[in-house]
């Protein structure tokens, strides 16, 4: 709702495009996902299928810095763990919105890359009836 741009890795982009592009106008969630400009970071995606998409093929960090400098609302990244790791490593993340599920797994991807030190402050915590907790953190810079 608060975004006018989506920044996604290729795999997340393809999944989201398949799910949201065909949604009929007027679907609140579909409208929310289809309205923003989309930026996909990929060296292999040949042609975007989702309307209003730009492919970022190289100079990803510089491209994201340029996007952040433009006027507008927020840039949202969903999934795209490799991309998020790169953004965190270059101090390009201003907020984290996390969903914590009441489930423990013995393996999985790291939430943060090695060597990244960033301080965030809890802005809000929202528990849901399912047991999921939504956490919103704001980046603290000195």
Image (cartoon, helix red, strand yellow):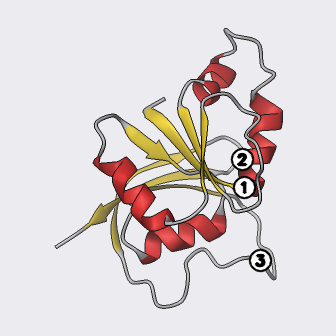
Q: Look at the numbered disc 2 and give the secondary structure of its residue.
A: helix
Residue 64: x and y, percent?
Answer: 43, 57
- Residue 106 visible in the displayed image: yes
Asked whether the beta carbons under mark 2 and mark 3 sit within 8 Å of each other, the answer is no
- Which residue is label 3 attached to? 108
* Nearer to us: label 1 or label 3: 1
Compared across the picture, whether 133 is left or right of 27 comes to left
Is the residue under label 1 in contact with that under label 2 (CB below 8 Å)? yes
Q: Residue 10 shows which numbered tag? A: 1
Of residues 92 and 117, the one drawn nearer to the viewer in this rendering: 92
Which mark is first along the chain, 3 or 2? Answer: 2
Alpha-carbon distance for marks 2 and 1?
5 Å
Residue 19 percent coordinates (x, y) = 81, 33
Residue in the picture at 76% in, 26% down:
21
How many other residues sit within 10 Å of disc 3, few (<14), some (14-19) or many (≥20)? few
Q: Residue at x 75, y 29 (%)?
A: 20
Dot 3: what SS?
loop
Residue lying farthest top?
26
Kindly identify the residue that appears in the image at 44 percent across and 84 percent down: 116
């Amino acid at each position: 709702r608060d975004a006018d741009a989506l920044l996604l890795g290729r795999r997340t982009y393809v999944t989201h495009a398949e799910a949201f592009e065909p949604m009929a106008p007027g679907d609140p969630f579909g409208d929310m996902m289809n309205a923003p400009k989309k930026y996909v970071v990929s060296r292999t995606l040949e042609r975007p299928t989702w309307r209003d998409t730009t492919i970022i093929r190289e100079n990803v960090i510089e491209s994201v810095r340029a996007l952040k400098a433009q006027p507008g609302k927020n840039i949202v990244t969903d999934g795209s763990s490799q991309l998020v790791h790169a953004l965190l490593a270059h101090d390009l993340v201003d907020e984290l919105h996390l969903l914590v599920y009441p489930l423990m797994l013995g393996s999985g991807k790291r939430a943060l890359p090695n060597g990244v030190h960033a301080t965030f402050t809890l802005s809000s915590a929202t528990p849901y009836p399912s047991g999921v907790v939504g956490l919103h953190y704001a980046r603290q810079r000195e």
